[in-house]
Amino acid sequence: MTPPPGSVEEARLLLASELEEAVREAAARGGLLPADVQGLRVRWLGKKQGVVTALLTRLRDVPKDEKAAFGAGVNALKQEAEERLARLEAEAEARAAAAAEAAKAVDVTLPPRAFPTGRLHPLTVVRRRIEASFRGLGYEVADGPEIESDWYNFESLNFAPDHPARDAVDTFFVKGGGEGRDALLLRTHTSPVQMRTMEGRKPPIRVLCPGRVYRKDDIDPRHSPVFHQMEGLVVDEGITFAHLRGTLAAFARSFFGGRAEVRLAPTFFPFVEPGVDCAVSCVFCDRKGCRICSYSGWIEIMGAGMVHPNVLANGGIDPERYTGFAFGMGIDRIAMLVYGIPDLRLLFENDLRFLDRTW
Ligand code: DAH
């Protein structure tokens, strides 16, 4: 039998079914929370819109002889609602307290959380290894600007005015298109630091100058418009080609391993005389010939030579009294070689899948 609409009996049945429904529905998410019960309380017992309050305001429309029974019915309903809600509330609070406690507990069976640490970039690792090899021979590390004048980058280093390296096709000019010694450009090699070092101090000089250099190269697996070089300069009385050769041989053994040998072949650089290309015996095949050394047994790693007297003079050093040698190598190229990195771009793209290896 359905109770008459608007009756207390109807409201009682509604209360029961609504609360059961709420409990059932909340079961899937672990049960009612205190906030859910609060919502139900407002709906049923709220002072303004609550169902029970609404019934009470209807009391004045109830015929006189039914008022007493109606009033008693509403009060009984109110009490029932209060009791049921209080029970649900207690359960919800106990549940919330248990959840808070569980959240605090330490699950000792969980694996430890990974603690991510940074790593050195492979170029930094290689630069530091090269520096360490030369520090053992008494070298200091010097620094120079990346924006250079034509004088430091070219003219003082004995580049003829029409030398192809000065061409605007290869060089990024910042000010002046290669005209005059005051033109500014992005240095195309670390050799200008040789000149700045000679100006700044007296022999004996033994310096290493690492840094970024720039050339107008299109980006491909072996080229980048910005890359890294390591320059070396030694100036003192009585420095000979034998010192250069011995130094490069010592570096090769220290950097590539005790069996590494060097081979020097004559070549031309304007700032040295004689100039050489320096190759190191292939450490991958022990000179037998492999893919890495193009089956030659040797890998070219740097240019070097005896500092040209004009360069010494430009640096304020008396070429009659002092001699010196210089060398320059590509850090990126050496990193690719020792780590088997197939593409230069990997060094510049900051992809963590690459950087997060152990170098
Ligand atoms: N500056 C040269 C280059 O960028 C490398 C070089 C060659 C540096 C011979 C030197 C040297 O100091 O003696 O290709």
Image: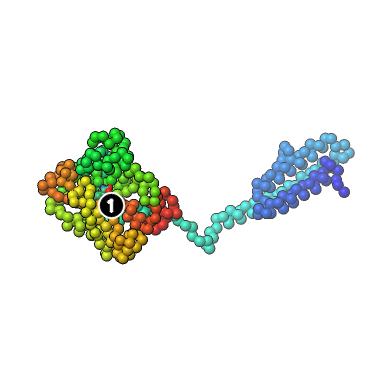
Residue 287 picture quarter: bottom left
Crowd around label 1: few <14 · some 14–19 · many ≥20 (10 Å): many
Q: Can residue 201 be spotted in the picture? A: no
Asked whether the viewer can see residue 75, the reply is yes
Q: Which residue is mark 1?
A: 329
The amino acid sitting under disc 1 is: Met
Q: Position of residue 86 (x, y in %)?
A: 70, 49
**Left or right: 153 in relation to 357:** left
Disc 1 residue: CB within 8 Å of ligand 1: yes
User: Residue lying farthest left?
Assistant: 320
Kindly indicate the quadrant of the structure image that contains residue 66. top right
Which residue lies at the image location 77% right of the left edge and 38% below the top edge? 54
Of 160 and 173, which appears nearest the observer? 160
Residue drawn 74% across and 40% down? Answer: 50
Q: Nearer the viewer, residue 262 or 339?
A: 262
Does 281 sit above or below residue 63? below
Q: Quadrant of the C terminus?
A: bottom left
Secondary structure at badge 1 equals strand
- The x and y percentages for residue 144 are 26, 43
Name the side, left or right, on which 53 lies relative to 134. Answer: right
The residue depicted at 29 percent of the width and 44 percent of the height is 188
Q: Is residue 19 left or right of residue 34?
A: right
Q: Residue at x 72, y 49 (%)?
A: 22
Seen in the picture, residue 104 relative to 168 is either above or below; the reply is: below
Residue 208 at what x, y percent from top left?
25, 50
